[in-house]
């Protein structure tokens, strides 16, 4: 067992050769289904946009370079470079399929390797709407998540940070994830009490809520033209569920909250910004996998309550999607 710095999860790497083979096989199957059995056209939200990236990232990156250093750095240059490289060998549709397959298989394998004792729940996490959606619609974010998770479970500090930074250059949400990670490490090392740590994150969340649009415009990030950085119409279902998870964390005690300081940090940040700005939901979704995995270390009635709430939340989420085109991921065309 390796204790990872600052609240990094304990990567157990449990399971024998048969389990590892089974996890690998299931990961490939999961990725194969997502990359080859969904339409490769605008029947799926944003799919046409990714086909444009797959065939024209060379022109896009030149436009950002012409805007200056900040414009280049904060407009996901590694994502564009990957598309440029893959387009040398594959057609746009094949590039998109490759990105989905790589991202989904890496993420699935890392999830299934985390804690084999909870194999069924780890499989369940793979169909969690905020997880699987990154390999159906938000493909750039899905790729960044897989790279970040490789860093999260990496034993080399230098390689870990290289992968963290690479993830932010694939999807800009990880600049905020890195900031939240550093904040969680600092507050943990300063031995802040749970309430003080939460208050610091709450203030940070308010600053982001009201200042993110200005920062995005200043840096020339593409998001400044894609989001209005305002509150969206929300059902409140997600807020209730994740608030419940946060309460369970608090009730688990000081040792748990210190060990999983990063998961608590992103939960408080997400809940703080939930009703103020829509885009922070995407930031939270970048690390929702880590929060889910942390939650499996709850004990006694807290774990049972989490699992029950999680099953209900996922069931209800899918139920609300049942009459939508491609379960909410389709355009209806």
Image (cartoon, rainbow, N blue to C red):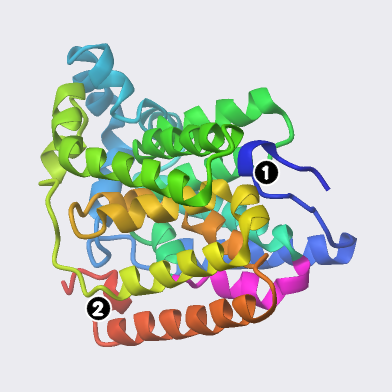
**Residue 153's disc number:** 1
Question: Residue at horizontal 18%, vertical 54%?
Answer: 276
Q: Nearer the viewer, residue 120 or 142?
A: 120
Extent of the magenta region:
116-128
User: Position of 241 compared to 44: left or right?
Assistant: right
Secondary structure mostly seen in magenta is helix
The kind of secondary structure element at disc 1 is loop
Say above or below: 60 vs 191: above
Q: Nearer the viewer, residue 174 or 17?
A: 174
Spot occupied by residue 77 in the image (x, y as percentages of width and height): 36, 26
Would you identify the image quadrant in which residue 112 lies? bottom right
Question: Residue at horizontal 49%, vertical 29%?
Answer: 166
C-alpha span from label 1 to label 2? 36 Å
Answer whether residue 207 is visible to the viewer in this image. Answer: yes
User: Position of 239 compared to 112: left or right?
Assistant: left
**Residue 325's disc number:** 2
Q: Nearer the viewer, residue 75 or 10?
A: 10
Spot occupied by residue 69 in the image (x, y as percentages of width and height): 27, 12
Q: Is residue 142 magenta?
A: no
């Amino acid at each position: 067992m390796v204790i990872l710095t600052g609240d990094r999860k304990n990567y157990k790497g449990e399971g024998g050769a048969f389990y590892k083979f089974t996890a690998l096989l299931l990961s490939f199957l999961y990725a194969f289904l997502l990359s080859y059995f969904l339409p490769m056209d605008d029947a799926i939200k944003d799919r046409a946009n990714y086909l444009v990236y797959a065939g024209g990232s060379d022109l896009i990156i030149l436009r950002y370079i012409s805007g200056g250093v900040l414009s280049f750095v904060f407009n996901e240059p590694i994502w564009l470079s990957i598309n440029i490289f893959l387009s040398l060998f594959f057609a746009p549709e094949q590039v998109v399929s490759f990105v989905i397959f790589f991202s989904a298989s890496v993420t699935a394998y890392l999830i299934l390797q985390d804690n084999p004792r909870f194999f069924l729940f780890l499989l369940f996490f793979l169909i969690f709407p905020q997880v699987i959606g990154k390999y159906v619609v938000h493909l750039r974010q899905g790729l960044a998540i897989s790279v970040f998770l490789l860093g999260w479970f990496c034993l080399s500090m230098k390689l870990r940070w290289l992968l963290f930074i690479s993830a932010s250059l694939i999807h800009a949400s990880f600049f905020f994830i890195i900031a939240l990670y550093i904040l969680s490490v600092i507050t943990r090392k300063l031995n802040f009490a749970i309430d003080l740590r939460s208050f610091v994150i709450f203030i940070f969340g308010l600053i982001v809520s009201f200042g993110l649009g200005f920062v995005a415009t200043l840096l020339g990030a593409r998001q400044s033209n894609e989001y209005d950085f305002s509150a969206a119409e929300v059902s409140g279902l997600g807020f209730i569920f994740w608030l419940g998870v946060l309460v369970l964390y608090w009730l688990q005690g000081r040792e748990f909250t210190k060990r999983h300081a990063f998961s608590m940090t992103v939960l408080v940040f997400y809940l703080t910004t939930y009703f103020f700005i829509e885009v922070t939901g995407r930031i939270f979704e970048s690390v929702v996998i880590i929060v889910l995995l942390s939650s499996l270390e709850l004990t006694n009635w807290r774990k049972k309550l989490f699992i029950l709430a999680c099953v209900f939340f996922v069931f209800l989420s899918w139920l609300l999607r049942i009459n939508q085109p491609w379960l909410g991921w389709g355009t209806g065309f």
